[in-house]
Amino acid sequence: MSRRTKWILLVLLVVLVGGVAALVLTQQPKLDDARTQVDTAWKPLRATDQLPLRYQTLTGALSAFDAAGGADRDVSKDLHAALKHWDASLQDGDAGAQATAANEVEAQGTRLTTNALGSPRLAADKAVTDSLVKYAQTKPKPELVAAYNRAVRDYEDVRTGALAQPVAKVLGFGARPVLAIDVDSANGAAN
């Protein structure tokens, strides 16, 4: 290999490394800022009068369901597991894991409601229906859910951009879930 070819390869290598470094240096702060916005928007949903209160009322509905004879059903077991996962995620402190756990609890809560109201025996139990009504009425503030979901969508736009996507993959900027919860009972739309 000639001396000139070696210099050309060295220059190309320096340009390539410089380009990668410039890409990381320009995209990583954008990714950090967008993910921080998601975490910031998540914090108000963890306030004691928001999701924790909702899941307390869901625990009450689950207890009534179990007491009425539903404890042996898979929905009860799955909801107990989802609530345990939610509690564990609160101790962990990771907003992404908490949002995932919240979505799991929401799905199982919907399943519990469907099971309870679909069973003539359980639907006739006043404790079950009253606790499910209380759960259905205990919702986080719609503006908090909307703000969080908007921050997640903005983060995803940044994370999946052409220049940021390789940086996000290498540096571990994973996806964050939107919060799938019906807070608009007027038209049933999830924010």
Image: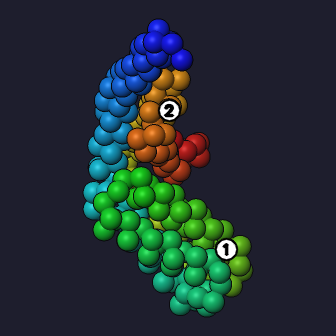
Q: Which residue is mark 1?
A: 115
Residue 14, position as x, y percentages in the image:
39, 19
Closer to viewer: mark 1 or mark 2 = 2
Numbered circles on residues, count: 2
Q: Is residue 152 left or right of residue 108?
A: left
Q: Which residue is mark 2?
A: 166
- Report whether residue 153 is seen: no
Residue 110 lies, with reference to residue 25, above or below; the image says: below
Residue 182, position as x, y percentages in the image:
53, 50
Query: At 30% across and 68% down in the image, what residue appears?
Result: 91
- Report whether residue 67 is seen: yes
Query: At 58% across and 76% down in the image, what residue appears?
Result: 78
Query: At 41% across and 41% down in the image, what residue appears?
Result: 171
**Local secondary structure at mark 1:** helix
Residue 41, position as x, y percentages in the image:
33, 42
Give, as a three-letter code, the residue at label 1: Asn
Residue 34 lies, with reference to residue 121, above or below; the image says: above
Going from the N terminus, do you reach mark 1 or mark 2 first?
Answer: 1
Query: At 31% across and 29% down in the image, what residue appears?
Result: 29
